[in-house]
Amino acid sequence: MINRPKKDFNITAGDNNFTVKNVILDSEPEQFFRPTSFQEIIGREREKELLYTMIDSVKKQWQQGKNVALDHILFYGPAGVGKTTFAYVLAKELGVNIVVTTGPAISKPADLLGILTNLERGDILFIDEIHRLRHNLEELLYPALEDYRIDIVMGTGPSAQTVRVSLKPFTLVAATTRIGLLTSPLRDRFGVSIYLDFLSQDNIVSLLKTLVSRDSQIKKIEREAMQKIAERSRGVARIAVKFYKRLRDLAIQAGSDTITADLANKGFKLLGVDKLGLDVLERKLIKTVIKEFNGGPVSLRTLAGILNEDARTIEEVYEPYLIKIGFIQKTPRGRLITPKAFRYFGF
Ligand SMILES: Nc1ncnc2c1ncn2[C@@H]1O[C@H](COP(=O)(O)OP(=O)(O)OP(=O)(O)O)[C@@H](O)[C@H]1O
Ligand SMILES: [Mg+2]
């Protein structure tokens, strides 16, 4: 378990003052590379332009002294494609504070209250994995999102009273890999929902060029090496960065400042990654279903059993790419290995 920063929040509700202690927050993780401006985010031109427009509009209104905030924004899409990156960059471009937490980290209403009442005008509250936010908290959030207020019940029994707390206009930025798990009332409260799809291979090549340009150790990467990384990265920026780092290790170890195609070949062999970007576990998964289940159909549970992984990880991490490249098909009777996968593995 990583050590997450905790903070105490003072809350004023009507005539009452109280403190919520130890609210779990996140800090920006150390990253090998993370864009700090829209300009550094590769691709996503339409999305960036949309966000620029929103930012310009709100900044103009601030200049006129208006008490407003950017509309709430939801980022959704597969893992490692830039949702968190966009949240941080938004805060930087807007010039506001960002408070970062995750759905499961907020455990009780007081935590959420503490966070919300301490936001300044225009600040961003970033809730990652919003699909894992508890439902009672979600309901507390609705009026906060819509009218910048929360109603809290103070005391119990006959003396209980509802106190309305006003918030400063703020922006909720949320991210999820599982938009289907969001309730529609929550989804409807975002002013804009932005789907971040897998990146193209050209985008990945641009990303690699950026990485080299900022790398004090590496001066050059051969075109063919970039191509190999792009083909194996599955359209996921995080995977491309990870591969780049491993190949960089090899180059540095060899006392070289160039990532060559030969070095890339050697690196991917060491990593156990094949030419489609499949790793050892994924190959094992497919081959086992072919050999022992004649290609299926098999249930998600069977797949989970083969890899000794939980079903959610299979569904969210392994399966999407295998489906995308047409190796697995979801059928009403279960998961089926396709003829294309049979051929690829030489069966
Ligand atoms: N469009 C992009 N341009 C440049 N770098 C990117 C881009 N998208 C992602 N990255 C890089 O990939 C890494 C992973 O991105 P990020 O953490 O934002 O993904 P995510 O969508 O939040 O993933 P998860 O769902 O796992 O939280 C970042 O460190 C960033 O460096
Ligand atoms: Mg993220």
Image: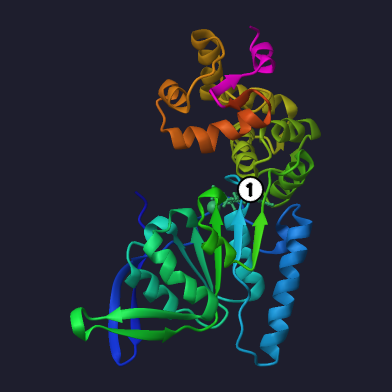
Front-lying residue, 216 or 11: 11
Residue 274: in magenta span: no
- Left or right position of 136 against 31: left
Segment tinted magenta in the rendering: 332-347
- Left or right position of 98 against 207: left
Label 1 CA crowd tier, 10 Å (few <14, some 14–19, many 20+): some
Q: Can you say whether 294 is above or below 322 in the image?
A: above
Q: Can you say whether 99 is above or below 158 in the image?
A: above
Percent x, y of residue 226: 75, 35
Q: Residue at x 50, y 50 (%)?
A: 181
Q: Image quadrant for the C terminus?
A: top right
Figure quadrant of residue 112: bottom left
Percent x, y of residue 70: 63, 75
Front-lying residue, 226 or 202: 202
Percent x, y of residue 186: 52, 63
Percent x, y of residue 264: 68, 28
Residue 334: in magenta span: yes
The residue tagged 1 is 81
Figure quadrant of residue 152: bottom left
Q: Can you say whether 158 is above or below 277 in the image?
A: below
